[in-house]
Image (tube, helix red, strand yellow):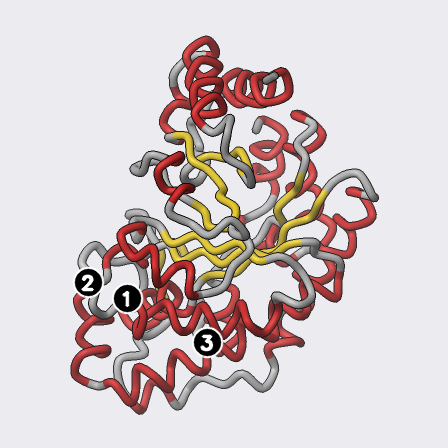
Amino acid sequence: LPEYRELRKEHTFHTLVKTPELACEVTMQPVRRYDMDAAIIFSDILVIPEALGQPYHFREQGGIGMQFKVDCEEAFEKLSSKTVEDHLSYVTGAIRNARKECGDTKALIGFGGSPWTLATYMVEGGSSKTYHLAKQIFYRERELFDRLMELITEATIRYFRMQIEAGADVVQVFDSWGGVLAPDIFWDASGKWIKKIVDAVKDDVPVIVFSKGAHGNIEELVATGPNALGADWTVKLPEFRRKLPDNIGVQGNLDPVLLLSNADLMRDKTNALLESMRELNGHIMNLGHGVSPDAKIECVAAMVDAVRNFK
């Protein structure tokens, strides 16, 4: 959004995330412009590793870099969850501010990364294309892997409880790299840790689980116990919905690249997806992944307009 880009001229990404007033402002910008039904708090999944003692930064060549790799016992000992709440108080401040602005008419979504997804950054030392080191830790040093996952899971549960207490109506778990896991290890490497998080907070608020590229593990995804499952753009949403129990909804799943096309095509594709879900309950209309920086404003507007006017 142009209003976001204006803020970025004056503030770094980290400053926006860590300043409650600014994070609230960025959170509300798309809601004000498009009259969305819900806002999602402006933050980053890597605030958890940072709170555990492993800061991150953006590499000049692109991607994420961590201050060190958690690939051995010595590195693991540098981490601690003792001060998670203190470290992440800026997020709860942003949520409280956004809660006031959303009022009773707009939902507010909190979120965090899945333990597996966070572990990939922490073990690899940043962004990865292969995730070989993270997988090796799982296969070869299972005790260390499980201890790391337990630490991340505990911190994430506390983080979600902070968000809920501050006013989040829903929380979402982003398992961004769940799809890189072989089916036979998906549960032990990712699914069971997500379930621990869902079990800890699902009595307080609904929980959405989104595991990108992992839709072949549908039984395991259902077993995590969410109220809704997000779907990326690579699956046929009606078929995916029919495979789920009636008490689990779906969120998704337009291809985000459509936002780079034109308003007419965006409107047609949105209507086609909505039509395909007409007889199926529990659908939250959304993209199948995040909005890219070069998305066209008119395409977002066309999508919202199509949803609002769908009969």
Q: Mark 1, mark 3: which one is toward the viewer?
A: 1
Residue 152: mark:
3
The residue closer to the viewer here, 178 or 293, is 178
Mark 1, residues whose alpha carbon is within 10 Å: few (<14), some, or many (≥20)? some
**Helix or strand or loop: what does disc 2 sit on?**
loop
User: Sequence order check: which comes first, mark 2 or mark 3?
Assistant: 3
- Left or right: 80, with 304 as reference point: left
The residue closer to the viewer here, 47 or 213, is 213
Give the percent coordinates (x, y) of residue 134: 24, 71
- Left or right: 202, with 186 as reference point: right
Mark 3, residues whose alpha carbon is within 10 Å: few (<14), some, or many (≥20)? many
- Left or right: 43, with 63 as reference point: right
User: Sequence order check: which comes first, mark 1 or mark 3?
Assistant: 3
The residue closer to the viewer here, 224 or 147, is 224
In the picture, which quadrant includes the N terminus?
A: top right
- Left or right: 184, with 38 as reference point: left
Q: Mark 2, mark 3: which one is toward the viewer?
A: 2
Q: CA distance from mark 1 to mark 2?
A: 6 Å
Q: CA distance from mark 2 to mark 3?
A: 21 Å
| Mark 1 touches mark 3? (CB < 8 Å) | no
The residue closer to the viewer here, 124 or 119, is 119
Residue at 43% across, 82% down:
150
Residue 186: mark:
1
Residue 182: mark:
2
Give the percent coordinates (x, y) of residue 294: 42, 27
| Mark 1 touches mark 2? (CB < 8 Å) | yes
Residue at 61% across, 32% down:
6
Residue at 52% across, 46% down:
249
Amino acid on which disc 1 is placed: Phe
